[in-house]
Amino acid sequence: MKSGPGTVSVIGLGYVGLCTAAAFASRGFKTVGIDIDVKRIEQIQHGRAPLYEPRLDGMLKRAVRKKLLVPTSDISQAASTHSIFLTVGTPSRNDGSIDLTYIETAAEELGRALRQKQSYSLVIVKSTVIPGTTNKTVKPILAKSSSKTIGVDLGLCSNPEFLKEGTAIVDALHPDKIIIGSDDKKSASKLKQLYTRFYGKNLPPIILTSPETAELVKYASNAFLATKVSFINTIANIAQAIPGVDVNHVAEAIGRDPRIGPLFLKAGPGYGGSCFHKDLQALINFSGELGYSPILLKATEETNEQQAEKVVELVEKLTGPLEKKRIAVLGLAFKKGTDDVREAASLRVVRLLLKKGARILAYDPLAVPNARKSLGESVEFAKDERSALNAADCCVVMTEWNQFRELQTKDYLGLMRAPNLVDARRLYDPKEYGAMNFAAVGLGPTRNDF
Ligand code: UDX
Ligand code: UDX
């Protein structure tokens, strides 16, 4: 492969890397996808995604067949491409701080692979990393192992992503902005050219800034979204104690104010997913190292942790003591459209229910295999939602899957031992569930109950 500007490598084929690689290949870029996990590479070579993401399987199959995507575990192949994205994971250590080991190893090996290369290439840090990482960690490692001068023979940019699981491909093809952080004009302009080539006349607004600012943008974005969720959950918990109040109506009303906006105001069991908790913890930790204690961000996390208890309180309110009660849990994924259970609120709720002696029968259309890895034999997994409801003392809806929306009062009443339903996702119209003992996050008691 000639390393012209239409050639790209992506190192680390997790959610972000794989979707990024698939997006480039789908637009005709010759793309090398690199991962240390040989099994993962074999799967991708057969055109199969090792994770669930709508559209991804089809895109991978086409890209591999047309040889536009070359999956490999050999990092030296990155040298045959012009632009090289680092998308390896950046997990949390036990104290919440960011673990940069994968970034460091990948930068070191990549530098070595580029040592003999004569022509210019551009390295782009897309993994979420704390401010200063591109300049203070990646840059010296790359410079040493490649023996090149960064900014002259080898470009370096920070370029965070904002992909959401479940819509990652659409997000990659239609982002609302592109952030390019670089200290040298050549690197920034090369990356801008790559994106101009990719998006053509649909090029989104590009924000050029320093690497440190670009790195902070990603954390600020996730911290703000998580705070919005914890904010509405706080209002939900207040609303829940006021007869006649529904947090959904509060959210709809305040969301009309353009200063607030309607999105990310859905009250629920608390946020999950691989990013919010990890990134908030990393930002809190990093901020602490700078000598500043970000109390707002700590409260966002604490509120989120507590939200699981609020859901369990609703269950207890309907069922009484949980010892030996049979609880149906509908939904395990951290949101609909994914098989991912990382940091899912369902896991926190299930663990609390188990601690209180409940027996759990859980169902999720996609996430059971992943949930089984976390919960093991402590819960029973049902083959569908109806089997989960069978003889249950209470059902709690934890993920907003569309198929759960179709369950009506008669289904619940016909299958369950007791007609107790907790809607932790506000999937149902309370008016239609009047025949049941119905409780929901952010829904105050009816005035008669008061
Ligand atoms: C990504 C970003 O990298 C992370 O910083 C951001 O916060 C969220 O999105 P994700 O795509 O979810 O993370 O990563 P993950 O699913 O953990 O996958 C990382 C991949 O990198 C794995 O397939 C792993 O095998 C691979 N890897 C890791 C390498 O190829 N080389 C390494 O040295 C380490
Ligand atoms: C998030 C960011 O949105 C994305 O930009 C970043 O790159 C990675 O992290 P993701 O984790 O895929 O994406 O999920 P997202 O759709 O943001 O939802 C996160 C959590 O918040 C989910 O558990 C979701 O159910 C919850 N949520 C979201 C709410 O409880 N209420 C809302 O109104 C919105």
Image: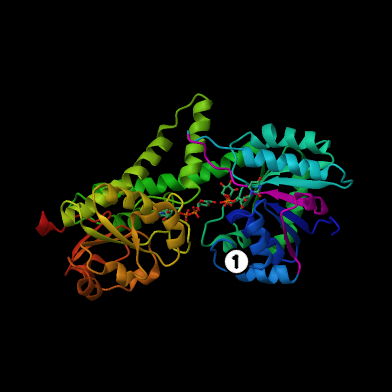
Characterize the local packing of mark 1: few (<14), some (14-19) or many (20 or more) Cα atoms within 10 angstroms.
Answer: many
Q: Which colour scheme appears in the figure?
A: rainbow
- Pinpoint residue 58: horizontal percent, then vertical percent: 62, 71
Q: Who's the residue at 53% across and 56% down the image?
A: 164
Element type at marker 1? helix
Q: Residue reaching furthest top?
A: 291
Q: Is residue 18 above or below residue 414?
A: above
Answer left or right for 256 relative to 247: right
Residue 310 belongs to magenta span: no
- Pinpoint residue 223: horizontal percent, then vertical percent: 47, 43
Quickly name the residue at label 1: 56
- Pinpoint residue 159: horizontal percent, then vertical percent: 66, 47
Where is the N terminus found, in terms of image quarters? bottom right
Answer left or right for 195 relative to 223: right
Front-lying residue, 212 or 250:
212
Quarter of the rendering containing residue 186:
top right
Residue 73 belongs to magenta span: yes
Front-lying residue, 350 or 378:
378
- Pinpoint residue 416: horizontal percent, then vertical percent: 21, 69
Q: Who's the residue at 46% across and 61% down the image?
A: 369
